[in-house]
Image (tube, rainbow, N blue to C red):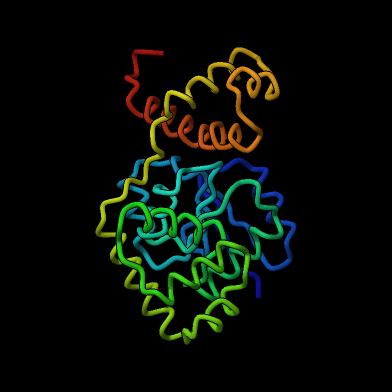
Amino acid sequence: MRLHVAVLDDYDLLRGTLGADPRLRILGPGATRYDVRVLDPLGARPPELVREMLADDVPTVVRTAGADARAVVAAWAAGANDVVTKVLGASHLADTLCTAVSHPFHLGAGLAEAIVEVTGRAGPGVESRLGEVLGQVRRGRRLTAAMQQAGLTPAEYEAEIRTLRDTLRGAGLDLRPAPPTPRQREALVLYAEGRSLPEIQQQLGVGPRTLAELLGPIPDRLRAELRALNRARTPDRP
């Protein structure tokens, strides 16, 4: 039986690519009953509406162009099953949607890495065996293999991950993408001026990986700001 999928806030391209997967049936924009949904991007809606949506029982995968770790973990703590980047291929995204339904506490490598970063920086305690599992998953190991090596049963893992999610939910993490840093603004201005990526690297004196980190989160932030501007715009101002 195919899963009924709702794609929220993205373009028709994603609906078309996911619709080619025989496991999925992509519903129209007005659908209200579905098995799983994709929210793309993270900044597409006001944080309070995103939290309200993620608090229900419908499995949800959030797709982002590169939100910072704090916003990724905030989405997971609010109820998202996984948070993935736009570079994830259609077949892998379809796998993630199926996993969100069949194994709701499964974590992907990107989400595990964000959790490790946030818990290491903000201080919420992580049980040692769960910390070992997260560390292995972030490096690409399968969750079941990581659990086995850490000595965590599925029931213990679920209990620990629930506790961690509740702790992080109470930490007040912001769902909105963080504002650009001065360095990111500088890179974005150069890009807007028409400079090539190699030229921006040379101007800033950074390598490809650092440049990707600088520019990667910009699309989500820009979409969020544009949507906020559109919501605030009065009818008599074009």
Q: Is residue 98 above or below residue 42?
A: below
Specify the quadrant that holds the N terminus: bottom right
Residue 100 lies, in percent from the top left, at 53, 68
Q: Quadrant of residue 221?
A: top left
Q: Residue at x 64, y 58 (%)?
A: 93
Q: Position of residue 210 (x, y in %)?
A: 58, 35
Residue in the picture at 37% in, 41% down: 176
Q: How many marks?
A: 0
Q: Residue at x 30, y 61 (%)?
A: 124
Residue 148 is drawn in which quadrant?
bottom right
Q: Position of residue 77 (x, y in %)?
A: 36, 60
Residue at the outermost front position: 205
Which residue is depicted at the point 63% across and 64% down?
140
Horizontal and vertical percent for residue 129?
A: 43, 77
Which of the image's four quarters has the C terminus?
top left
Q: Is residue 36 above or below residue 232?
A: below
Q: Is residue 237 above or below residue 220?
A: above
Q: Nearer the viewer, residue 80 or 36?
A: 80
Of 176 and 7, nearer the camera is: 176
Query: In this orientation, which residue lies closer to the viewer: 235 or 114?
Result: 114
Q: Is residue 54 left or right of residue 220?
A: left
